[in-house]
Image: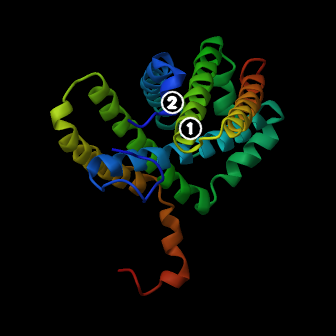
Amino acid sequence: MHKYSYKNGGVFIWFLQRFSGFVLLGLLLTHMLVEHFTLGGHELSYELVAKRVATPLWKIIDSLFLVLGVFHGLNGVWMIASDYIKKDWLKVVVVSLLLCLAGILLTLGLLTVIPFKA
Amino acid sequence: MRLEIPFTKYAWHSGTIAWLLHRVTGGALIFYLTLHVWVTHHLGKSPEEFDQMMKLLMHPAFRIGEIGLLAAIVYHSLNGMRVLLVDLGIGVRHQEKMFWWVIALSFVLCVLGGLELFPWYLLQNPIFKGLLP
Protein backbone atom coordinates (compact mmCIF):
# COMPACT_ATOMS: atom_id res chain seq x y z
CA MET A 1 0.00 0.00 0.00
CA HIS A 2 1.34 3.37 -0.98
CA LYS A 3 1.92 5.68 1.93
CA TYR A 4 0.43 9.12 1.28
CA SER A 5 2.45 11.76 3.03
CA TYR A 6 -0.57 14.04 3.30
CA LYS A 7 -2.21 11.61 5.70
CA ASN A 8 0.38 12.62 8.27
CA GLY A 9 -1.10 16.12 8.22
CA GLY A 10 -4.19 14.74 9.90
CA VAL A 11 -7.84 14.62 9.11
CA PHE A 12 -8.38 18.03 10.71
CA ILE A 13 -6.50 19.89 7.94
CA TRP A 14 -8.37 17.81 5.35
CA PHE A 15 -11.63 18.92 6.97
CA LEU A 16 -10.48 22.56 7.16
CA GLN A 17 -9.68 22.53 3.44
CA ARG A 18 -13.28 21.45 2.63
CA PHE A 19 -14.82 23.82 5.17
CA SER A 20 -12.76 26.85 4.05
CA GLY A 21 -13.62 26.08 0.43
CA PHE A 22 -17.32 26.06 1.25
CA VAL A 23 -17.17 29.35 3.19
CA LEU A 24 -14.99 30.92 0.46
CA LEU A 25 -17.66 30.19 -2.14
CA GLY A 26 -20.24 32.07 -0.05
CA LEU A 27 -17.82 34.98 0.49
CA LEU A 28 -16.94 35.05 -3.21
CA LEU A 29 -20.59 35.22 -4.26
CA THR A 30 -21.15 38.07 -1.77
CA HIS A 31 -18.02 39.86 -3.02
CA MET A 32 -19.06 39.54 -6.67
CA LEU A 33 -22.68 40.57 -6.08
CA VAL A 34 -21.72 43.67 -4.10
CA GLU A 35 -18.51 44.76 -5.81
CA HIS A 36 -19.22 43.94 -9.44
CA PHE A 37 -22.97 43.58 -9.94
CA THR A 38 -24.24 46.29 -7.57
CA LEU A 39 -21.49 48.88 -7.06
CA GLY A 40 -19.13 49.24 -9.95
CA GLY A 41 -19.70 46.79 -12.75
CA HIS A 42 -16.75 47.13 -15.09
CA GLU A 43 -15.71 50.54 -13.85
CA LEU A 44 -14.41 50.44 -10.30
CA SER A 45 -12.98 53.57 -8.78
CA TYR A 46 -11.40 54.61 -5.49
CA GLU A 47 -14.57 56.43 -4.51
CA LEU A 48 -16.76 53.34 -4.90
CA VAL A 49 -14.35 50.88 -3.28
CA ALA A 50 -13.20 53.16 -0.44
CA LYS A 51 -16.73 53.72 0.83
CA ARG A 52 -17.25 49.98 1.19
CA VAL A 53 -13.84 49.06 2.63
CA ALA A 54 -14.06 51.82 5.28
CA THR A 55 -17.02 50.16 7.05
CA PRO A 56 -16.20 47.84 10.01
CA LEU A 57 -18.42 44.99 8.79
CA TRP A 58 -16.66 44.90 5.42
CA LYS A 59 -13.26 44.99 7.14
CA ILE A 60 -14.27 41.81 8.97
CA ILE A 61 -15.67 40.16 5.82
CA ASP A 62 -12.65 41.11 3.69
CA SER A 63 -10.18 39.97 6.36
CA LEU A 64 -11.98 36.63 6.69
CA PHE A 65 -11.98 36.29 2.89
CA LEU A 66 -8.23 36.94 2.80
CA VAL A 67 -7.31 34.63 5.68
CA LEU A 68 -9.44 31.73 4.37
CA GLY A 69 -8.27 32.32 0.80
CA VAL A 70 -4.60 32.28 1.75
CA PHE A 71 -5.07 29.18 3.92
CA HIS A 72 -7.11 27.27 1.34
CA GLY A 73 -4.80 28.24 -1.53
CA LEU A 74 -1.45 27.60 0.09
CA ASN A 75 -2.65 24.45 1.85
CA GLY A 76 -3.80 23.33 -1.60
CA VAL A 77 -0.32 23.98 -3.01
CA TRP A 78 1.15 22.00 -0.10
CA MET A 79 -1.28 19.10 -0.80
CA ILE A 80 -0.01 19.01 -4.38
CA ALA A 81 3.64 19.39 -3.41
CA SER A 82 3.50 16.69 -0.74
CA ASP A 83 2.26 14.23 -3.37
CA TYR A 84 5.57 14.52 -5.18
CA ILE A 85 8.18 15.45 -2.59
CA LYS A 86 9.73 12.52 -0.81
CA LYS A 87 12.80 14.08 0.80
CA ASP A 88 12.23 15.48 4.28
CA TRP A 89 14.59 18.44 3.88
CA LEU A 90 12.75 19.49 0.71
CA LYS A 91 9.43 19.37 2.56
CA VAL A 92 10.86 21.73 5.17
CA VAL A 93 12.05 24.10 2.42
CA VAL A 94 8.68 24.08 0.62
CA VAL A 95 6.66 24.57 3.82
CA SER A 96 8.96 27.45 4.83
CA LEU A 97 8.51 29.12 1.44
CA LEU A 98 4.73 28.70 1.59
CA LEU A 99 4.64 30.13 5.12
CA CYS A 100 6.71 33.11 3.94
CA LEU A 101 4.28 33.72 1.06
CA ALA A 102 1.35 33.40 3.49
CA GLY A 103 3.02 35.93 5.79
CA ILE A 104 3.58 38.41 2.95
CA LEU A 105 0.03 38.08 1.58
CA LEU A 106 -1.59 38.37 5.02
CA THR A 107 0.58 41.32 6.10
CA LEU A 108 0.08 43.25 2.86
CA GLY A 109 -3.65 42.43 2.70
CA LEU A 110 -4.54 43.03 6.34
CA LEU A 111 -2.46 46.23 6.51
CA THR A 112 -4.49 47.50 3.54
CA VAL A 113 -7.90 46.57 4.92
CA ILE A 114 -7.80 47.00 8.72
CA PRO A 115 -6.40 50.54 9.17
CA PHE A 116 -8.13 51.90 6.04
CA LYS A 117 -9.98 55.22 6.30
CA ALA A 118 -11.85 56.70 3.35
CA MET B 1 -3.59 2.34 -7.60
CA ARG B 2 -0.76 4.81 -7.48
CA LEU B 3 -1.21 8.43 -8.42
CA GLU B 4 2.24 9.88 -8.40
CA ILE B 5 3.92 11.73 -11.23
CA PRO B 6 1.54 13.34 -13.73
CA PHE B 7 1.14 11.62 -17.10
CA THR B 8 2.99 8.48 -16.11
CA LYS B 9 1.18 6.15 -13.79
CA TYR B 10 -2.54 6.61 -13.96
CA ALA B 11 -5.43 5.76 -16.22
CA TRP B 12 -7.34 8.57 -17.89
CA HIS B 13 -10.94 8.75 -16.82
CA SER B 14 -13.30 11.56 -15.80
CA GLY B 15 -12.05 11.53 -12.20
CA THR B 16 -8.48 12.03 -13.38
CA ILE B 17 -9.46 14.98 -15.55
CA ALA B 18 -11.48 16.48 -12.68
CA TRP B 19 -8.55 16.05 -10.27
CA LEU B 20 -5.97 17.50 -12.68
CA LEU B 21 -8.20 20.47 -13.65
CA HIS B 22 -8.85 21.16 -9.97
CA ARG B 23 -5.11 21.41 -9.31
CA VAL B 24 -4.36 23.51 -12.39
CA THR B 25 -7.20 25.98 -11.71
CA GLY B 26 -6.24 26.09 -8.02
CA GLY B 27 -2.68 27.03 -8.94
CA ALA B 28 -3.94 29.74 -11.30
CA LEU B 29 -6.17 31.13 -8.55
CA ILE B 30 -3.25 31.40 -6.09
CA PHE B 31 -1.41 33.42 -8.74
CA TYR B 32 -4.46 35.65 -9.14
CA LEU B 33 -4.88 36.05 -5.36
CA THR B 34 -1.30 37.30 -5.11
CA LEU B 35 -1.87 39.82 -7.91
CA HIS B 36 -5.20 40.88 -6.41
CA VAL B 37 -3.67 41.55 -2.97
CA TRP B 38 -0.91 43.56 -4.62
CA VAL B 39 -3.35 45.60 -6.75
CA THR B 40 -5.66 46.22 -3.80
CA HIS B 41 -2.87 47.46 -1.54
CA HIS B 42 -2.76 50.63 -3.68
CA LEU B 43 -6.01 51.54 -1.92
CA GLY B 44 -3.98 52.48 1.13
CA LYS B 45 -1.49 54.57 -0.86
CA SER B 46 -3.55 57.29 -2.53
CA PRO B 47 -6.82 57.60 -4.48
CA GLU B 48 -4.81 58.62 -7.56
CA GLU B 49 -2.60 55.54 -7.49
CA PHE B 50 -5.60 53.25 -6.98
CA ASP B 51 -7.54 54.80 -9.86
CA GLN B 52 -4.47 54.55 -12.07
CA MET B 53 -4.33 50.84 -11.21
CA MET B 54 -8.03 50.39 -12.05
CA LYS B 55 -7.44 52.17 -15.36
CA LEU B 56 -4.58 49.81 -16.17
CA LEU B 57 -6.88 46.84 -15.47
CA MET B 58 -9.31 48.12 -18.10
CA HIS B 59 -6.72 47.22 -20.75
CA PRO B 60 -8.15 44.58 -23.13
CA ALA B 61 -5.41 42.11 -22.14
CA PHE B 62 -6.67 42.12 -18.53
CA ARG B 63 -10.32 42.11 -19.63
CA ILE B 64 -9.69 38.95 -21.66
CA GLY B 65 -7.60 37.52 -18.81
CA GLU B 66 -10.62 37.99 -16.55
CA ILE B 67 -12.57 35.54 -18.71
CA GLY B 68 -9.88 32.97 -17.94
CA LEU B 69 -10.14 33.90 -14.27
CA LEU B 70 -13.91 33.37 -14.44
CA ALA B 71 -13.38 29.95 -16.03
CA ALA B 72 -10.92 28.93 -13.29
CA ILE B 73 -13.18 30.18 -10.48
CA VAL B 74 -16.35 28.63 -11.89
CA TYR B 75 -14.75 25.23 -12.49
CA HIS B 76 -12.89 25.17 -9.16
CA SER B 77 -16.09 26.15 -7.27
CA LEU B 78 -18.39 23.68 -8.99
CA ASN B 79 -15.93 20.79 -8.88
CA GLY B 80 -15.13 21.72 -5.27
CA MET B 81 -18.81 21.25 -4.43
CA ARG B 82 -18.74 17.87 -6.20
CA VAL B 83 -15.68 16.84 -4.18
CA LEU B 84 -17.36 18.00 -0.96
CA LEU B 85 -20.54 16.03 -1.73
CA VAL B 86 -18.61 12.88 -2.60
CA ASP B 87 -16.44 13.25 0.54
CA LEU B 88 -19.61 13.56 2.62
CA GLY B 89 -20.83 10.35 1.01
CA ILE B 90 -23.58 12.06 -1.00
CA GLY B 91 -24.10 10.86 -4.57
CA VAL B 92 -20.88 8.83 -4.69
CA ARG B 93 -22.41 6.55 -7.32
CA HIS B 94 -23.26 9.58 -9.45
CA GLN B 95 -19.86 11.27 -9.15
CA GLU B 96 -19.04 10.72 -12.82
CA LYS B 97 -22.38 12.12 -13.95
CA MET B 98 -21.80 15.05 -11.58
CA PHE B 99 -18.44 15.73 -13.22
CA TRP B 100 -20.06 16.14 -16.63
CA TRP B 101 -22.66 18.42 -15.06
CA VAL B 102 -19.78 20.47 -13.62
CA ILE B 103 -18.23 20.74 -17.09
CA ALA B 104 -21.54 21.65 -18.76
CA LEU B 105 -22.48 24.26 -16.13
CA SER B 106 -18.96 25.75 -16.19
CA PHE B 107 -19.17 26.05 -19.95
CA VAL B 108 -22.56 27.80 -19.88
CA LEU B 109 -21.52 30.22 -17.11
CA CYS B 110 -18.22 31.04 -18.85
CA VAL B 111 -19.95 31.75 -22.17
CA LEU B 112 -22.51 34.02 -20.45
CA GLY B 113 -19.83 35.75 -18.38
CA GLY B 114 -17.43 35.89 -21.33
CA LEU B 115 -20.02 37.67 -23.52
CA GLU B 116 -20.35 40.26 -20.74
CA LEU B 117 -16.62 40.62 -20.01
CA PHE B 118 -15.22 40.58 -23.54
CA PRO B 119 -14.02 44.03 -24.72
CA TRP B 120 -16.30 44.09 -27.77
CA TYR B 121 -15.14 47.57 -28.80
CA LEU B 122 -11.96 45.89 -30.09
CA LEU B 123 -14.01 44.65 -33.05
CA GLN B 124 -14.51 48.25 -34.17
CA ASN B 125 -10.81 48.30 -35.00
CA PRO B 126 -10.24 48.75 -38.77
CA ILE B 127 -8.32 45.43 -38.99
CA PHE B 128 -11.65 43.61 -38.62
CA LYS B 129 -13.28 45.64 -41.41
CA GLY B 130 -14.95 43.39 -43.95
CA LEU B 131 -14.66 40.32 -41.72
CA LEU B 132 -17.79 41.20 -39.78
CA PRO B 133 -21.31 41.93 -41.03
* Distance between mark 2 and mark 1 Cα atoms: 6 Å
Give coordinates of residue B69: x percent, y percent: 51, 49
Taking the view exactly as shown, the residue that stands out farthest to the bottom is B130
Question: Pointers 2 and 1 in contact (CB under 8 A)?
Answer: yes
Q: Which image quadrant: the N terminus of chain B?
A: top left
Which mark is on residue B18? none
Q: Which image quadrant: the C terminus of chain B?
A: bottom left
Give the structural element (helix, strand or loop) at label 1: helix
- Res A31 seen here: no
- Chain of the residue that carries numbered disc 1 in the rendered image: A
Horizontal side, residue B11 vs residue B98: left or right: right
Give coordinates of residue B39: x percent, y percent: 71, 41
Q: Amino acid at mark 1?
A: Ser
- What residue appears at the point 53 percent right and 84 percent down from the top-left corner? B127
- What residue appears at the point 64 percent right and 32 percent down from the top-left corner? A48
Question: Of the residues under marks 2 and 1, which one precedes in the sequence?
Answer: 2
Give coordinates of residue A43: x percent, y percent: 59, 45
Which mark is on residue A82? 1
- What residue appears at the point 58 percent right and 35 percent down from the top-left corner? A78
